[in-house]
């Protein structure tokens, strides 16, 4: 077995969601979940089929994001992996809907950070071992940082 670090090239002003699923039905079910949760959502999705024809299945509401998702799925090449690029929508707005899709097994990350995926490859195929999401901590929050965090969450409407 060998391992590889794959850097995900996220389109400008996008968030990335990376997950593992288990069935071709995932493509349509995730599409429906996303558009039902945020009616004007802009997204591109690519699913790496892991059996049969082993095609990269795709869908979305913006061709640029669909094309970007397909390109990154080709780089990853991991069976049953799904990559979604969102523009103008935060992952927190759609995560509950995504997690409710019965085919979804694992959500590896939902991020606006730089993203690297640790991929393992054997004779059989490729799989996701884990992700490196953003940077490592640079310190510990102070009382001022805590106040600012709480103020931001309330300003954005996530807390009362």
Image (tube, rainbow, N blue to C red):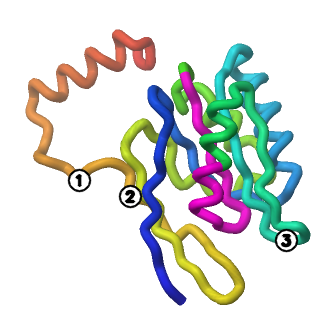
Q: Are marks 3 and 2 in contact (CB under 8 Å)?
A: no
For the residue carrying disc 1, how many other residues have a C-alpha within 10 Å: few (<14), some (14-19), or many (20+)?
Answer: few
Q: CA distance from mark 3 to mark 2?
A: 27 Å
| Residue indicated by mark 1 | 136
- The quarter of the picture where residue 98 lies is top right
Please, what secondary structure does the residue beneath circle 2 have? strand
Residue name at image x 62 percent, y 48 percent: 83
Residue 17 position, x and y percent, is: 56, 43
The residue beneath circle 3 is 51
Indicate whether residue 80 is drawn in magenta.
yes
In terms of depth relative to the viewer, which is nearer, 150 or 51?
51
Mark seen at residue 132: 2
**Marks 1 and 3, how far apart at CA:** 37 Å
Q: Describe the element under mark 3 as helix, strand or loop.
A: loop
Q: In the image, residue 93 lies at what x, y percent?
A: 58, 25
Where does the magenta region start and end? 71-87
Answer with the quarter of the image where residue 140 lies. top left
Q: Are marks 1 and 2 in contact (CB under 8 Å)?
A: no
Q: How many other residues sit within 10 Å of disc 2, few (<14), some (14-19) or many (≥20)?
A: some
> Closer to the N terminus: mark 3 or mark 2?
3
């Amino acid at each position: 077995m060998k391992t590889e670090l794959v850097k995900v090239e996220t389109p400008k002003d996008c968030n990335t969601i990376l997950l593992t699923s288990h069935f071709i039905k995932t493509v349509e079910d995730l599409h429906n979940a996303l558009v039902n949760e945020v009616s004007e959502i802009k997204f591109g999705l690519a699913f790496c089929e892991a059996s049969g024809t082993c095609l990269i299945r795709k869908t979305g509401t913006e061709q640029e994001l669909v094309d970007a998702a397909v390109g990154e799925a080709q780089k990853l090449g991991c069976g049953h992996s799904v990559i979604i690029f969102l523009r103008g929508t935060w992952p927190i707005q759609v995560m509950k809907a995504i997690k409710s899709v019965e085919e979804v097994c694992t959500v590896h990350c939902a991020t606006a950070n730089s993203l690297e995926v640790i991929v393992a490859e054997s004779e059989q195929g490729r799989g996701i071992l884990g992700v490196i999401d953003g940077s490592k901590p640079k310190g510990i929050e102070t009382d001022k940082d805590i106040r600012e965090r709480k103020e931001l969450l309330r300003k954005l409407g996530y807390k009362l």
